[in-house]
Amino acid sequence: MNPVMFLIGTIIFGAYMYFLIWNIFYNAKKNKEENYPGDYYNRHKQPDAMDMDGMGNFSRFPSTAPKPRKRPQKNKTKTKTPV
């Protein structure tokens, strides 16, 4: 009975190791596809635009041109001369 138990344990351990290694390689492949998509935007029907800051384009490109700044006017009052 001892050799039979050893044989059954070896078979179970071998199956466990096979599926463990298969799972590691399968998930590594899926992870690589998700993190480095070759055709991600076409697959998900999105425009090919990279939004680096996550704020959308409004944070980098203002919708209107800034107004020109006015220079402060000098005081035109005459200063008194000391007597």
Image (cartoon, helix red, strand yellow):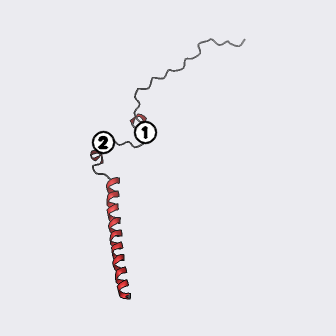
- 43 versus 58 height, above or below: below
Mark-to-mark CA distance, 1 and 2:
17 Å
Which one is in front, 75 or 79?
A: 75
Q: Which mark is residue 37?
A: none
> Residue 71 in the image: x percent, y percent?
51, 21
Name the residue beneath numbered marker 2.
Answer: 46
Which one is in front, 49 or 77?
A: 49
The answer to whether mark 1 and mark 2 are in CB contact below 8 A is no
Q: Badge 2, how many Cα within 10 Å: few under 14, some, many 20+?
A: few
In the image, is 77 to the left or to the right of 8?
right
> Residue 14 in the image: x percent, y percent?
34, 76
- Tell me which residue sits at (30%, 45%) in the image: 44
- 64 versus 51 height, above or below: above
Mark 1 against mark 2, which lies toward the viewer? 2
Which one is in front, 27 or 38?
A: 27
User: SS at mark 1?
Assistant: loop
Q: Badge 1, how many Cα within 10 Å: few under 14, some, many 20+?
A: few
> Residue 9 in the image: x percent, y percent?
37, 80
User: SS at mark 2?
Assistant: loop
Which one is in front, 26 or 71?
A: 26
Which amino acid type corresponds to the residue marked 1 in the rendered image?
Met
Outermost residue, front side: 1
In the image, is 59 to the left or to the right of 72?
left
> Residue 76 in the image: x percent, y percent?
59, 13
- Tell me which residue sits at (27%, 45%) in the image: 42
Name the residue beneath numbered marker 1.
Answer: 55
- 6 versus 78 height, above or below: below
